[in-house]
Amino acid sequence: MNKPDASVHRSTISASIFPELGQRFRNVRKLTTSLIRNLEPEDTVIQTMPDVSPTKWHLAHTSWFFETFILAPLMPEYEPFDPAFNYLFNSYYNQMGQMHSRTQRGMLSRPSLSRVLAYREHMDHWMIRLLGEQSDTRVERLTGLGLQHEQQHQELLLTDIKHVLSVNPLKPACFTDVQMPLASTEISPIAFVGFEGGLQQHGHAGDGFCFDNELPRHQILLQAYELANRPVCNADYQAFIDEGGYRRSEWWLSEGWAWVQQHQVERPFYWSDQSDQEFTLLGLQRLNPASPVCHLNYYEADAFARWFGARLPTEQEWEYAASSLAIGGHFIEAGRYHPGPCESTEPQVLSQLFGDVWEWTASAYCAYPGYQSDAGAIGEYNGKFMCSQFVLKGGSCVSSQDHLRHSYRNFFYPSSNWQFTGVRLARTI
């Protein structure tokens, strides 16, 4: 497979106006292309369901973002790579013009993968030049946003290609040069850590980067509650299945039970029919009972919680519990691309809040009091999706560690399960 020409990265940034940002730009862009190192060009074209975008599309769209929102408006001498890409690789920004249908992205055999990689080289060259020549604070702010956007698409690229490869009868691996995390036979029982609640501050704090949906910081009232010390693992979820989890309606929301009936669901997404294997980015692997259960949708997470005699935490409860903890865990930087086993932990110590699996909360994705979306087309990034979705917290094994914050709000529809999504329980005191 053709690889990007590294020569575009050789220009020095020692005299750059934004040297740290320039280096971060290089690192993020390099990581994206490293994720396709074992893929064939044919792998990068396929779209297996409407929520999935082809790998090639992710590679191009992330470059389109830099071209559209940074280079075109802020660098008069910029030379567009191909004007047709404005239409092909716009995702959902209506203010930027018409776009190719999301559900038909898999029909684009052209431009070829090699041309898309050339497009990335073109963007890298012009962005490095821009960061070395302009001191406009808009360059710094928008480049930071573009890199956060690319990190989101790194995760989407991997979850999407996982779905693409999973429908192939050969069950090929995305990564053939990575070992599966060692299976663990020790599983500590779920324990609960108590929090007194009270008046607290919620939302992003400080001067660092955040998305507009994390603001403004505001006051909330928490009732006393408990949060599970670890994520729910595969063995926990198997017990739910064994007690008729997918056959008994009393644990399910009405919409969730309708989803089970309509799709004849009997087990988590990617589990084998015998529930002894699961499909992963490393191919078909033996199911590890101690690993966090993943690829659950909101309905499944909520049903498990009801069966257990607990509930899902609110995003405010989750964020308050995590607020004093460092952001550490199993992330994309580890190069494992699969959740690690649930760690043996003291009953009163919260473990694995970050990384491994995104954790569903019971909170609808909506605006905070006083929320204002960013001006212009950039304002379409988050605000217009505040309808019928739920918030997830903490990141996953394919999230970048430096992309996450305590206040970070991921959001998906309740039926979505192709992401690395899991569950942590809560209880009201």
Image (cartoon, rainbow, N blue to C red):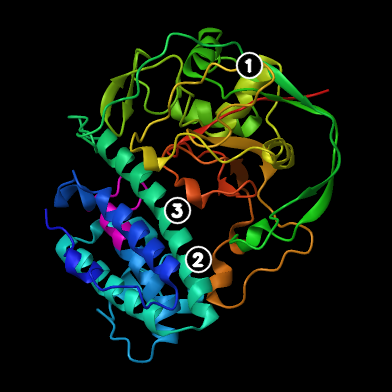
Task: Find the residue positioned furthest to the left.
Answer: 1
Nearest-to-viewer mark from 1 and 3: 1
As for residue 54 lying within the magenta part, the answer is yes
Res 311 quadrant in image: top right
Q: At 77% from the left edge and 24% from the top edge, which residue is drawn?
A: 194
The residue that label 1 is drawn on is 346
Amino acid type, residue under disc 1 in the picture: Glu
The residue that label 2 is drawn on is 145
User: In the rendering, at what x and y percent does residue 330 appear?
Assistant: 45, 34
The residue that label 3 is drawn on is 152
For marks 2 and 3, the one nearer the N-term is 2
The reply, left or right, for residue 7 in relation to residue 134 is left
Task: Find the residue positioned furthest to the bottom.
Answer: 76
Amino acid type, residue under disc 2 in the picture: Leu
Q: CA distance from mark 1 to mark 2?
A: 38 Å
Q: At 42% from the left edge and 38% from the top edge, which residue is drawn?
A: 418
Q: At 35% from the left edge and 36% from the top edge, which residue is drawn?
A: 337
Residue 97 visible here: no
Amino acid type, residue under disc 3 in the picture: Gln
